[in-house]
Image (cartoon, coloured by chain):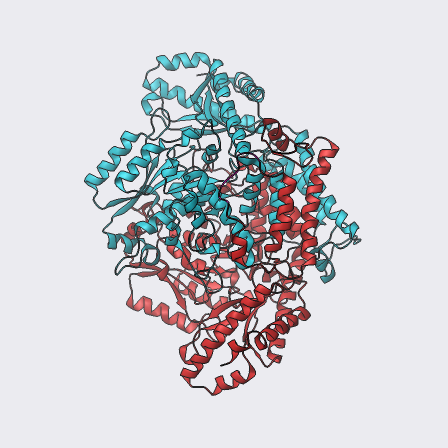
Chain colours: A red, B cyan
Amino acid sequence: MNEAGGTRRGGLVATPETLRRVFVMRENDSARETLVKYMEQILFGLQDFLRRHVGITEEVPIKELSSRYMDSTISLEPEKRLAEVITGLIKEIAPHAVNVSSPYFVGHMTGAMPFFMVHLQTIVAALNQNVVKVETSKVVSIVEKETLAKIHRLIFKLDDGFYNAHIQSPSTSLGGFVEDGTLANLTALWVARDRLLAPRDGFEGVEREGVPAAYKEYGIDRLVVIVSQLGHYSLRKSGGVLGIGNQNVLPVPVDRHNKIDVNRLRALLDDLRANEPKTRVLALVGIAGATETGTVDPLERLADIAQERGIHFHVDAAWGGPTLFSEKYRHVLSGIERADSVTIDGHKQFYMPMTCGMVYFKDPNAMDAIAYHSNYVARPGSVDLGIRSLAGSRPSTALILHGALKVMGQRGYALLIDHGIDLAREFALEIQRRPNFQLLTPPELNILTYRYCPANVQEWLDAANCEERRRITIRLNRGNMLLQRRQREHGKSFVSRTTLRRPEQRGGDMVVLRSVLMNPMTTIGILKEILDEQEAMARGELAKAFTV
Amino acid sequence: MNEAGGTRRGGLVATPETLRRVFVMRENDSARETLVKYMEQILFGLQDFLRRHVGITEEVPIKELSSRYMDSTISLEPEKRLAEVITGLIKEIAPHAVNVSSPYFVGHMTGAMPFFMVHLQTIVAALNQNVVKVETSKVVSIVEKETLAKIHRLIFKLDDGFYNAHIQSPSTSLGGFVEDGTLANLTALWVARDRLLAPRDGFEGVEREGVPAAYKEYGIDRLVVIVSQLGHYSLRKSGGVLGIGNQNVLPVPVDRHNKIDVNRLRALLDDLRANEPKTRVLALVGIAGATETGTVDPLERLADIAQERGIHFHVDAAWGGPTLFSEKYRHVLSGIERADSVTIDGHKQFYMPMTCGMVYFKDPNAMDAIAYHSNYVARPGSVDLGIRSLAGSRPSTALILHGALKVMGQRGYALLIDHGIDLAREFALEIQRRPNFQLLTPPELNILTYRYCPANVQEWLDAANCEERRRITIRLNRGNMLLQRRQREHGKSFVSRTTLRRPEQRGGDMVVLRSVLMNPMTTIGILKEILDEQEAMARGELAKAFTV
């Protein structure tokens, strides 16, 4: 309501005239300059801040920050000028946000972006298209379809004939953009559920009649989803949302490489077939880049099993999907092209801004199972992308990916992938070289886990009996938990932590430090500094915690 | 990979060096200038384009546009420089997108934004926080909680004590940001489902055990959701997704003011109680701004009924919610404060960029029913916003609304609301003044529907018998459908169309033109031009279509 260029002083007042001003395009040069000045302030105010603070955040506790944001009222008149809001964001909010673009931030699947992503996001915001329908997006819906085809082809590698037929077909869908990986997995399972419990003579399908009626019709007692114990929790959530029950998302143990234990999987399937004739498998899920360990399931073998038994095969490649760009490492995902559906996230290794989930289906008619229409949008036969989509209104995020693919090329993305995996291997060697650290899951992609464990404790552990081992593990768990938290609070660097499941006799569940390497500015030198800091803390302020 | 400031000519190549360049903050002044130049190009390139073309889109058919986007491959090396991608977006894509910010675009719930929204969106992109967890967002999660409290208070008007207790409480939630209104409605019904079919002795709840087990436990045959026939199609979709079956979203007829017929509603509830002892009502939904007609259900009366019968009362205020800012019109939503849950969209009448859905719960513990945890994020007891949320990774959209509320103030938004409703009333009078138009649903908020119907045909209709009336209606439906499409194709202005249900004896379902007035730059003069254009088409190129 009150742009800085204005002359209003003292109390701010909303009037139709100020209102109109903020909606009108900038007509004269001085008004334009103001607009650009704001943008400059945003781009450089933020960047200067981030450069000054190589660390990840200011050292102010959450509790203290919470006390600053306790106002539940909305002021009657405008409270601040835009310039003040921008300054506030840069000076009060940014310093206490997390500098996910720091090369010292190697803990989560969020990282630095190429700067042009911000420009592309700005274009998306300025155009403000809604791809739910062609009437509010027109060519942008068409560009989205082209983008979907490009990624579909990267995954499934079908032929020209296929893509020519479907790339712009209004009656088929190669996939869809969703909010994030959770909604991508949900959409994949939603489609799988509706295809399995499809309409047939006298039954209108699970979507229309509901899960109980569908079970009755198909003589089913339960549907199960099968995934390794490292499956993302969104799969459980999807089971809950879709009405099949999240306890029916069945975890299969992993082998010592953190991949689904195929023998245990076969045994489970055989057991279900033999002993639970009324249980049906909704989907077998392969993981291409486990959130905790970065490991990839043996997709070819899973594809074989799914094919043999006629099960929907979903691959959760939210993290690892873009590995397909790398000539050096794409073989790790071999078999993904045999999936029925694939999840892949744009805000992860496509380096797009938060958020962009995507789901792809090999069968371009698969999403018909979840088509919805209404009187005013998504009319049958239209190009409206809202017809086959969980969400209604959607931003034109595809424009960002479409532009990014052109600017980066396959090789640009491959360089990022290769850097991350190569660096993770180097980091693993460094961890192994240090006697007080243990590498726990070596990197298959660009994620690894390790923990701090003093060399003498490692010796004791090797010699310990079950009970002692358990006791020591509990102690180490607490130590590593404190270590991770303390390092985060110091604000200079950040690794995350998780808990890996391990049998009781081997010491039980284990708290580990987790490192995700997706920033091309992160070097082995920086990673050594991070280990140094951890070691200094573990020997200094946290020494007591590591005394067992 | 290749910024315009670079010197690379000829074939573009991705190298580690160019890669690093696009990730590094701009160090020197000339590199900075390039960044700003791009942003200037975006802001003004787009705006100049839009100013030159007051209309809504270029007159190129979808088919023709489709043929330009048929490339399913991703080039190996970079294909374009960023400058070229930006130019392409401005010169090739924008002209064929839809100028939703044109004051002549009065057809959908997408419109002009205050320019500062683009700036705020740019900040969100540049910070790239992920509010799934505090470790990737820190203060931004706290700002989100404050923002939720502000809107919660706008809706539910609870007291200071309540907000002081919950605004920053890590263990309760006042609501959540979701992708759009569909996901807000889905979340509301998901929570309602899980609270109704809650865990109890020997039963772990519907989320864990699934809908069939829950029905068995609770002795239920079906759950139903009740809403007027004008309910948004996302409610049906939610019924499908949640496993209760979309046929169990029961439409109640509307009265002649397009509000739910309360007598029919009571009769339905009585009938279910008397004749279907195994049917339970999951939720009663009141509409606060029907998508097609903008009408608002009698929320007080619905609240009474829901309260009497112990039913979850949800209000879908995706469109109308911000009417609460207007002293002049907020009374229309009276009763919304008695809802158990409310949907409200940021990208609609909060004038935020695509997209921002929100869902609010009066009970700050309601969302506990859908809490999920994992080992690496959303740990129990943490402030992680991902604990109670359908999506996992989420952008920090709340920052935009937080800033906008400060810049606009309640009165700023109220001016927008008042302008829209006042203008809609003026437009309704103008339609009534013109003998060849019929006003079909007068505006309660800022949406109305009408159709073109030559004056002589109106006379015939009045005198016609049922069969004739039906025949004439079919003719008029086709005429109005053509009229809407032709006007859209001409590209100067845009109204939408929908089909209103009407009994056969009154002529049957009726195609109507629908106008949504949310742009403060739209004037009655512009609306007159739009009617003039329609009239000219109906009398000229479409004359035959309107001859009955």
Above/below status of A239 relative to A165: below
Q: Is residue B47 left or right of residue A223?
A: right
Q: Is residue B458 left or right of residue B394?
A: left
Q: Quadrant of residue B130?
A: bottom right
Span colored in magenta: A71-78
Q: Is residue B309 left or right of residue A540?
A: left
Q: Quadrant of the N terminus of chain A?
A: top right
Is residue A64 on the magenta stretch? no
Q: Nearer the viewer, residue A236 or A300?
A: A236
Secondary structure character of the magenta stretch overall: loop
Q: Quadrant of residue A2?
A: top right
Q: Residue at x 60, y 42 (%)?
A: A125
Task: Name the spot of residue B152 as percent of width and height, x first.
Answer: 44, 42
Q: Nearer the viewer, residue A107 or A391?
A: A107
Task: Name the spot of residue B5 as percent of width and height, x first.
Answer: 77, 50
Q: Is residue B376 left or right of residue A14?
A: left
Q: Quadrant of residue B92?
A: top right
Task: Name the spot of residue B85 as percent of width and height, x first.
Answer: 69, 46
Above/below status of A396 relative to A442: above
Q: Nearer the viewer, residue A329 or A449?
A: A449
Name the residue furthest bottom: A463
Q: Residue at x 43, y 47 (%)?
A: B174
